[in-house]
Amino acid sequence: SSGINAEWPLRPGDDGGNIVMSASSDIGDPIKEIAAEVGIEIDDEGTSVIDHMNYDVSDVGDHDLIVADSFISTSVIVGESPKPVLFKGVGMAADSDNLLVIDILRASPTAYSHAANQDILEYPLAIGSSLLLVAGMQARNNARIVIFGSHDMLSDKFYNADVKAQGAEGGVEAAGNQEFASNVVDWALRRNGDLRFSNVKHNKIGEAPSDAAYRITDEVEYSILIEEMRNGNWEAFKGSDVQLDFQRIDPFVRTFLVPDAEGVFKVEFKVPDVYGVYQFKVDYDRIGFTHLYSTTQVSVRPFHHTEYERFIPSAYPYYASAFSMMGGLFIFSFVFLYHKDAPKADAIKKTE
């Protein structure tokens, strides 16, 4: 119908859904237009990724059956220590203006994208490490999209194949296509790398949580439960780089939260010596994980007039100066009132 266009397949993503696509050298314009909508440019029909240095030993001569192992260093997407994979398909390039595109699998530095057995008369779409074999994007609403540049790399033939780059030492090994594809699809469908938080608490140390305002220089405790989706199950998140900001416009306190075995992240700190309206803010945004954002607003008041110390240590010099002045005045008054000069000798002679 007239309502179907390049944006139509992406509507689930606008609602927070997830999309997995694959392409090949026989790609048509509709798939290219859909990819362009998310900041990924796919090369023209009839082109393929060619690598004269890293092709598989079973390649028939076009050097387009390549061995790829330049995975993104994010285990939540590709798994721990992924094995080299076989790739035979079309190349892609990321839009440099789209910071949300993720380079899941890149080509080697010696690869390029072009039609096989044709002279190169124009600069290719991309060369080397800027050439993408598998690309993804996580939108600001946490919707995920993954595009594989090869149908074949998802086939049973490639799943069960052996792999060895031409000229590489050692024997053949099983291709990692199945494990790699499974991990990437699980990530795309948010079976991995999805974060959620709950049970946010804050209180003065030693007291129960309360909505009452804090006082400047109070010792407070903040805690938040963070869970991670792993293989379809919610588990305690083990991240060590989650930060808490205690801020007004700018942070007055920024510190790391320390997790326990249950996934509860805690920290203790002293409230700044500046009153106002503050926020406890956790803003965790890392590649491969959904964006975690939590804010809690609190008020910080100054001391009441009855809460100040009787004697403030920083005022001791002023206390000393006041008492020293009082003592000096007392001594001066005593001397002035009771001191009498001795009579002079001339005055004595005249009286005689």
Image (spheres, grey):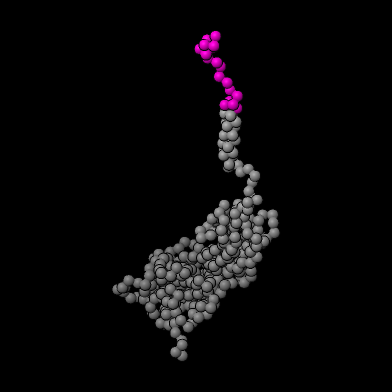
Query: At 69% from the left edge and 54% from the top edge, which residue is drawn?
Result: 206
Name the outermost residue toward the left: 121
Across and down, in percent, residue 326 comes to 59, 34
Residue farthest along the front direction in this orientation: 351
Q: Is residue 350 magenta?
A: yes
Task: Find residue 193 and report its image quarter.
Answer: bottom right
- Residue range corresponding to the magenta coloring: 334-352
Q: Residue at x 55, y 54 (%)?
A: 274
* 52, above or below 36, in the image: above
Q: Image quadrant of residue 201?
A: bottom right
The quadrant in which the C terminus is found is: top right
Residue at 40% across / 68% down in the picture? Answer: 96
Q: Mainly helix, strand or loop, the magenta region?
A: helix
Q: Is residue 35 magenta?
A: no
Residue, x 49% and y 78% (percent of image)?
Answer: 21
Percent x, y for residue 46?
Answer: 38, 79
Closest to the observer, 108 or 300: 300
Name the foreground residue: 159 vs 32.
32
Task: Locate residue 213 relative to residue 40 in the image: left or right.
Answer: right
User: How many numbered marks appear?
Assistant: 0
**Is residue 308 shown to the viewer in this render?**
yes
Q: Is residue 59 visible?
A: no
Residue 226 placement (x, y as % from top left): 62, 64
**Would you place residue 160 above or below residue 308 in this image?**
below
